[in-house]
Every structure is written in structure tokens, then in C-alpha cells.
Image (cartoon, rainbow, N blue to C red):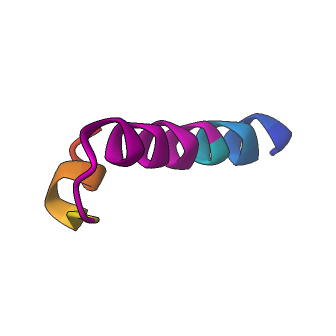
Amino acid sequence: KIQAVCAVMRKLLMAIHAMLKTRSTFDSRRFYSL
């Protein structure tokens, strides 16, 4: 259970990091393809 939570948190952090790095807005299609 904890592993699943960590995986989701990591996925969110990677998406936020990518958004900040590319200075783009949130795109759910790109986010869910990770």
C-alpha cells in the first residue's frame, strides 16, 4: 500500500518538475501518459 502511494507521489513530482522545467501549463493528456 505504501509503495503505491509513493509511486503516485513520484509520478506527480515528476510531472510538476517537467512543467517547471519546460515552463508549460498542466496538460492532463501528457501527465497520464507518463
Query: Which residue is depicted at the point 28% across and 65% down?
Result: 26
Residue at 21% in and 44% down: 33
- Reply yes or no: does residue 1 show up in magenta: no
The part of the image, by quadrant, that contains residue 6 is top right
Q: Main secondary structure of the magenta part?
A: helix
Q: Residue furthest front?
A: 23
The span picked out in magenta is 10-25
Left or right, residue 13 beside residue 18:
right
**Percent x, y of residue 18:** 36, 38
Q: Quadrant of the N terminus?
A: top right
Total tally of numbered discs in the picture: 0
Indicate left or right for 4 with 10 as reference.
right
Residue found at the very far left of the displayed protein: 29
Question: Eyeballing the image, is 25 above or below 8?
Answer: below
Residue 3 x/y as whole percent: 76, 34
From the viewer's side, name the closer residue of 5 and 18. Answer: 18
Q: In front here: 22 or 34?
A: 22
**Residue 17 in the figure: left or right of residue 7:** left
In which quadrant of the rendered image does the C terminus lie? top left
Where residue 20 sits, quadrant-wise, is top left
- Could you tell me which residue is drawn at 28 percent across and 49 percent down? 23
Q: Is residue 24 magenta?
A: yes
| Residue drawn where x is 68% and y is 42% of the image | 4
Left or right side of 8 for 29 = left
x, y percent for residue 14: 47, 36
User: As displayed, is residue 30 above or below residue 3?
Assistant: below
